[in-house]
Amino acid sequence: MFCSKCGKEMKKGTLNGRGDNFFLPEGETSPKLLSNKILKKKNAILLPPSSFGIPFCEKFPHAFWCDECKLLIVDYSELM
């Protein structure tokens, strides 16, 4: 998927949350424990805690992230 703002290719992954919300790139496994150090090692992008509240999802929604624009696109169709 390409960013609608800048046209660059976006990273594919999932929107995750258990307290803090973060974008996890495709290929990375969800961490068992959450800390800034672990999230950084997983290449996760921490999002503001007030963005979305999906702490109890069994399957996190697919998402795309643009590093350039800081744009996140989330597909909630599988959760509805």
Image (cartoon, rainbow, N blue to C red):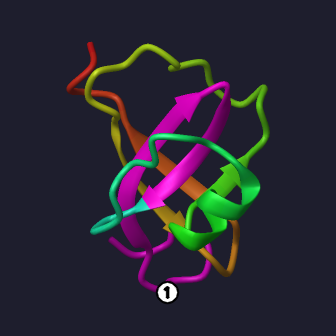
Say left or right for 73 vs 12.
right
Image position of 6 with respect to 47: above or below: below
Residue shown at the point (71%, 46%) measured from the top left: 47
Image position of 34 with respect to 44: above or below: above
Q: Which residues are magenta?
A: 1-24
Say which of 53 and 10 sits in front: 53
Q: Magenta stretch: residue 15 in it?
A: yes
Say left or right for 24 vs 51.
left
Say which of 43 and 47 sits in front: 43
Which residue is label 1 attached to? 8
Q: Give how far across and how far down residue 21 sits, in percent.
A: 63, 37
Element at label 1: loop
Q: Residues within 10 Å of mark 1 (few under 14, many from 20)?
A: some
Residue shown at the point (74%, 56%) measured from the top left: 36
**Looking at the rendering, which quadrant does residue 68 occupy?**
bottom right
**Looking at the rendering, which quadrant does residue 48 occupy?**
top right
